[in-house]
Amino acid sequence: MPVFDYSLLLKGPYHDMLVAGLVLSLELAAATLVFALPLALLVALLRIAPVAVLRWIGFGFVEAIRNVPLLAHMLFWYFGAPELLPESVKLRIYQGNIEAISAVIALTLYTAAFMAEDVRSGIRAVPPRQFEASRALGLGYVATMHRVILPQAVAITVPPLISQTLNLWKNTSIATVIGAAELMYQAGQVESASFRSFESFAFATTAYLAVSLIITGLAVRYQQRFPARPA
Amino acid sequence: MTELIHTYWLYFLVGPYPNGPLGGLALTLLLASLALLLGMPIGVLLGIARVSPYPALRWPVTALMFIVRGTPLLMVVFWAYFFLPSVTGHKTDKFTTMLIALVIFSGVYLAEIVRAGIHGVPKGQVECARSLGLGHWRTLRFVILPQALRAMLPSLLNQFVLTLKETSLGYIIGLTDVAFIATQINTLVFTKPAEVYAILGLTYFLLCFGLSRCAQWIDRRHTHVIKSARHDPI
Amino acid sequence: MIQFENVNKWYGTYHALVDVTETVTQGEVVVVCGPSGSGKSTLIRTINRLESIQSGTIHVDGRNIHARDMRLNEFRSRIGFVFQQFNLFPHLTVLENCTLAPLQLQGLTSAQANERALALLDRVGLAHKANAWPANLSGGQQQRVAIARALAMQPPLMLFDEPTSALDPEMVGEVLAVMRGLARDGMTMVCVTHEMGFAREVADRILFMDQGKVLERATPDEFFSRPQHPRAQQFLADIRTPFATA
């Protein structure tokens, strides 16, 4: 077994490639979070709306997305969806960073579907008496949600959402199949260029674990500072 | 779209078989089933180790589980793909590589489900068994595990659905699972990518949604409720 | 049979048991009563080491139960414990609940274990339910099975932690009847209970506890007609006239 070559990872072109990959992975995750959280909230509200049609739309969204692997989503948004667009739009898009855009779209929809279910569980965990009490006072549906239900639901929902963020971080690795130059892709590139597969994969694994550790640490700290209190 | 289905349905279902190795949907199902079957004993053993009173057993297993759960499955697949040949001495085929990666991954997630199941058994049951004089291992064997495993059934089915989706990563190492086959078909047809991938999505959807509904039905029939392992960030 | 000497227990900073020194002799039926939070459940749970103690000693049958060479499982198998929440094993039938421990720990054959279990179930009036599932039994029936299960190990000592508190009122009687039968047969029993009628009729001695201390120990006659300690007097007054405002 060849000697583990640390120098490869600490400086030089391969190091730069790996770090660039790590940065892009982080950017993909951050961009996804920005779009997925509001979308998840919207879908969760649809899921519990008083109107049946809205509930079915929410249900359809969640089930259609959750039951298809992220890989298939990525393939669809990269290979399939652009073909449906008119030529002019297509040309403009292809000039930009379409790999990253497709990845973010796929990741956003996928993560939002799971987060929506966690938000919905959080809302449902607030006892119905709270809702009744608020309506009895005269507050409308939206005001009740805004002032009474959602603030209580937030505390319960945060741990599962952090868990989903962990999943999101790991899922960014799948963007490699459509050629997005994130960490996994770069690790593969370094491997084929230098044949030092152990070093490049060790770097990537350590990077993934480090961020996973940070995210998990956040969850533990949150649970310590805000233990779930029953109403 | 119908001509697409009409022309390629068999290839989609079983790949180049019998003129080549099994592929397509059949391969996906086979891979997921084997992964879960082989992963289950590992999951139970790791789960028991995780709740055992001996730190020498608990800490290494907890560390191992953290490492596997903090790493993307794709990474595990890559490790298996690049390093299994040097470990086993000869070239491992893609199916075995993917299977081993999935077994390791599922085993750890199943361990978490087992651990949650064990914790879900009411504390009074444990106190009572210990009061009768049953020691730690006998209590586990006769009182805790029978109740835990029964309550875990919906979570197990859920894990099977997850594993089905995870088989799609075989695409990356060239395993002819249904996602790979879809891409091959896309290359052949070339002019209908949206439709090809929509059919792929629909296939996964029907399979996974159907299984999830089964799980919910089983869950409703069993009145046991345990906290889902998904909601524990650690 | 049981000797407490200067037993103290803390939960964090909360002093749950304060300098408890008591003796229970063989064949005695001792009832422990008192207001909520007085430490009665804690006290009884220290006897089979479901709770730990920080100072003092507890001897059962002459042996220090916290000694290093004490084999915990064997020790516990010789004490019968009946819980407030019954805690029957839901995945086993009534008969299997009663035969599990004897089969595993006393090396009985199936035939022997079944025979013993059926005799005990008959004694508590539930032999006809031997193959039923716990979920299909009423609370009172489940608790009687729990008593049979505890008796199946043939312990010389039985501990009861509020055995009727979780039952609907009409089922309390059937459980107390079983316990009375046990007492008449000479079993050493320590019971934590609110059932004063049972205490008056069956107990040899009553221990009254409040805030972790045993404040009064007396025979039922003395306790109910001439309570000495003011807290005990208050307790009995509250029980007799719950709505008194004076």
Image (cartoon, coloured by chain):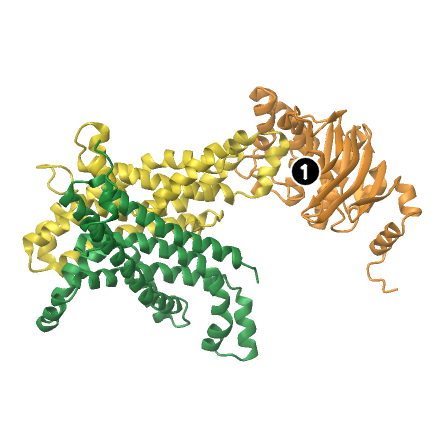
Chain colours: A green, B yellow, C orange
Residue at left 10%, top 51%?
B185
Q: Residues within 10 Å of mark 1 (few under 14, many from 20)?
A: some
Q: Is residue B106 above or below residue A124?
A: above
Residue at left 17%, top 42%?
B175
Q: How many discs appear?
A: 1
Residue at left 56%, top 76%?
A136
Image location (x, y in percent) of residue C186: 80, 28
Q: Is residue A13 above or below residue A118?
A: above
For this rendering, which residue is in front, C12 or A73?
C12
Chain letter, disc 1 residue: C
Q: Quadrant of the C terminus of chain C?
A: bottom right
Residue C122 seen from this side: no
Relative placement, left or right, of B6 versus C40 is: left
For this rendering, which residue is in front, A49 or C73?
C73
Q: Quadrant of the N terminus of chain C?
A: top right
Q: Is residue B125 above or below residue C239?
A: above
Helix, strand or loop at disc 1?
A: loop
Which amino acid lies under the numbered mark 1 shown in the image of this protein? Ser
Q: Is residue A130 above or below residue B139?
A: below
Image location (x, y in percent) of residue C20: 80, 39
Image location (x, y in percent) of residue C191: 76, 39
Residue pushed farthest right? Answer: C226
Relative placement, left or right, of B196 versus A32 is: left
Identify the image quadrant of residue C73: top right
Which residue has dot 1 on it? C52
Identify the image quadrant of residue B23: top left
For this rendering, which residue is in front, A21 or C128?
A21
Residue C15 seen from this side: yes
Relative placement, left or right, of B107 versus B32 is: right
Image location (x, y in percent) of residue A119: 42, 63
